[in-house]
Image (tube, rainbow, N blue to C red):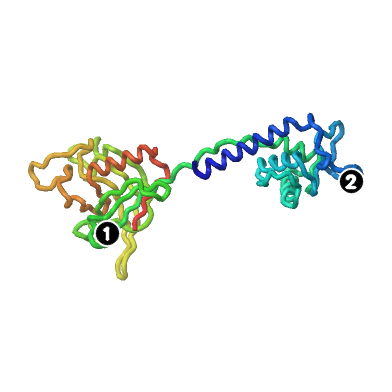
Amino acid sequence: MNRTARSVWATLATTALAVAAFATLGTQAPDTASASSDPAASAARADTPASGIQQQWPTLRTGAQGSTVTTLQQLLTARGHSLTADGEFGPLTEAAVRAFQAQHGLQADGIVGPQTWSALRSGAPSAKRTAPHPATYTLKFTKNWNDPQNSRLALLRDGKVVVSYRAGSGKDFSRNECTSSTGWLPSGTYRVEGHTTNRGADAMPWNEPAVQGYVIELADKVCKPVSGQKAVNRTDLFIHSEMKADGTQGYSIFEDDSLRRWEDDRDYKSSGCIKLRPDHIKGLFHQLDRAGWPKNLTLQVS
């Protein structure tokens, strides 16, 4: 059982004990050692019964002991003021009482009278399981400076790798981020603009896009120029493979290298995008389908 689950069950148990204890209060005689022995002091306090309200529980203050103090400590714990239910009204219990009273607009004197008991009773929460926070998914492209076409693209869930694939970016081993259609993808953070499994399906044969099929579209990025070089806004950036618009592999009839068929590792080269093998990009889509395609999905390139 993980720490969160143990905490939830501990709160449930504490609240259940406190509620059960309150069910018996008023039907049993209070601990005489726990009750106030100074009626005049009790009457002078602000925490006294309002008109028409009868005192049903003993007034408790520092030094009190017994089962009623244990009930008080259980109720304070159920309200978020963690205490050991040892039946001893000591400094820690007094501090918790003062804090609780201040939170509920009562005189924070550390003395538990009818108004404090009433606030504890009406406010004792039932422990509920909280909904887990949605996972954070991130794509991460790690450049291989020794071999650009042997870089890595990973999908991370809350910072932990879910899947990782070999990936390429750029042509002819170019590491120049500011060379359009040749240099590899500029470093930085990219917003994922959209995704599709059939890019180019509606295009006419004479106007087909070079990138087809399973495609993740990335936002444009301005490169980081080196000394003496001008910055370039890199556009038409994708995570993709080589395939037909319907995701299948094409045939090469008139050329050795087809944009519609993955031949071998030489196909990792790209015009500055990120390229995966066809089965790998389909696997990546499968993982993101399972995650519901997070709306704030980003790509980190370094």
- Give the amino acid type for the residue marked by disc 2 in the picture: Ala
**Residue located beneath label 1 in the image:** 144
Is any part of residue 107 visible from this angle?
A: no
For residue 143, above or below residue 204: below
Element class at badge 1: loop
Residue at x 25%, y 49% (from the top left corner): 275
- Earlier along the polypeptide chain: callout 2 or callout 1? 2
Taking depth in this image into account, of 118 and 145 the one nearest to the observer is 118
Mark 1 residue crowding within 10 angstroms, few (<14) / some (14–19) / many (20+): some
**Disc number placed over residue 262 in the picture, else none:** none
Residue at x 38%, y 54% (from the top left corner): 189
Question: Gap in Å between the C-alphas at discs 2 and 1?
Answer: 78 Å
Taking depth in this image into account, of 9 and 65 the one nearest to the observer is 65
**Disc number placed over residue 41 in the picture, else none:** 2
- Give the amino acid type for the residue marked by disc 1 in the picture: Asn
Counting from the top left corner in percent of width and height, residue 102 is at 74, 47
Element class at badge 2: helix
Counting from the top left corner in percent of width and height, residue 220 is at 34, 52
Residue at x 69%, y 32% (from the top left corner): 20
Taking depth in this image into account, of 7 and 288 the one nearest to the observer is 7
Is any part of residue 94 visible from this angle?
A: yes
